[in-house]
Image (cartoon, rainbow, N blue to C red):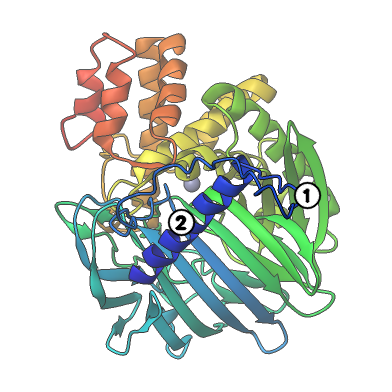
Amino acid sequence: MQRTIRLFSYLFLFSLLASCRSQAPVSIPVPSPTVPPIVPPIELPALPAEQPTATPTPAPERAHYRLDTSLDYGNKTVSVDQTILYPNHSGETLNDLLLAVVPDLWPGGFTMTALSVDGTPISTYSLDGQKLSFALPASLAPETTLTVSLQYVLNLPFAEQQDPGVERPRIYGYTSRQVNLANWYPFIVPYEAKTGWVLHEPWYYGEHLVYEAADYEVNFKTDPGVVVATSGFAEPNGETTRYTLTAGRAFVISASPEFQVVSAQVGGVTISSYYFPLYESQGQIVLDVSSQAVELYSQRFGPYPHRTLAAVMGDFNDGMEYSAFYYLSRDFYNLYDGNPMNYLVFVAAHETSHQWWFERVASDQAENPWLDESLATYCERLYYETYYPELVPAWWPYRMYYYDPSAKMDIPVYAGAGFLPYTNATYFRGAHFLEDLRERIGGEAFFAFLQDYATQMDRKIATPQDFFAILRQHTGTDFSDLIASYFANSY
Ligand SMILES: [Zn+2]
């Protein structure tokens, strides 16, 4: 950091002097042996009394991740040279860092060969499961930055079969026809003033990670013939492709030599559907639903946050949302029968909506999973109301196939006692709550609230308190009985 400030000072001084010269051009008269040359006086602006070494480099709004990445598709290994420019917006002086390293959950899955902070090698660190922590060589004051550099190799796990007893889709790793890099790079977890670093334990279903918004530059290369779907906007750059993502939560890469792709434009957004051979009709349906959903949710909640959206067929058993990217299970493609009241359709509408309720407005997925999942499930209903209104009466009970009206929706992921009770509470009870709330306060206030919630919480991590505080800015109608019925906590 010191080096950065000194360099900045030199650059500042140099540019100041350079600009002095350019602002006061001097014409040199031809010298004469008798008349001394007349040189017009040059007015120099006063230089600062001291070099501005005390002026810190302004901290950028978000962290910046650069990932120079090489995927050896044949050997299923990934080599990464990574730098993180991290601004400390915590309001506190930080003396250590905590990074989530999910690939280290697999034995031998993550081998780090270099780690440094501002050029100082870090030889003492703790790498325990998904947690990489170390003391900083120097304290990081609020609103200053540091740069973490890492080099590592990922040895991808075989992910076609689930571990026994695990109900969540196993995405990270490879199958016989696909490599999926999800939560594949170390990232600095959010820091909260009272509780410190936020990194929850993984659970058998649902998600446990919490993401701050960050900017990404991923320079990626892999074997010839491998088709790549990512979270980023692609620009060819010689042997590599440069992908960029602004204010994203989680950068994902899916690669397969078998991928086929169809694309469409909605406004300024390029939407692409990646699928395996023999699934052309399903791939087109996913593209159509995603395009309709982006148009609908943009009108309802505000603009889609990125330039691209990739919808990707995945060799596992559910859908999953990431930045400008979502997966849909191969099972939904296999089950598709041409009927719009079908998992392929409503899960595509659901996952697309996570670009608002996950991506624009993030939340703690382990502690408050209802915050994004209730809204994403309710967005399925908005999709059908808009494009297939005649199906809503049949679709709603069909989708709520497992519904326990006594469940409380505000449970952490760890309290659901199984995948079905968990989804019943956070997805289905949550969607019922939103339907009752809309009926109670009226559609106009309901949608004004959702648009404002997306705007006020844009690029932030929302809490239930944020949700209800913004809701109450849009209605004076009493809904305390709904809170009592649907929530264990009082809000
Ligand atoms: Zn969801």
Disc 2 packing (10 Å; few <14; some 14–19; many ≥20): some
**Residue 472, horizontal then vertical, whole percent:** 27, 18
- Under mark 2, the amino acid is Leu
Q: Which of marks 1 and 2 is nearer the N terminus?
A: 2
**Considering the numbered disc 2 on the image, is that residue within a helix, a strand or a loop?**
helix
Residue at position x 70%, y 63% in the image: 242
For this view, does 155 lie left or right of residue 219? left
**Residue 90, horizontal then vertical, whole percent:** 25, 52
Q: Name the residue under label 2.
A: 13
Quarter of the image for residue 468 reads: top left
Residue at position x 42%, y 32% in the image: 431
For this view, does 3 lie left or right of residue 416? right
Quarter of the image for residue 265 reads: top right
- Under mark 1, the amino acid is Gln
**Residue 172, horizontal then vertical, whole percent:** 54, 72
Residue at position x 60%, y 61% in the image: 217
**Residue 329, horizontal then vertical, whole percent:** 63, 58
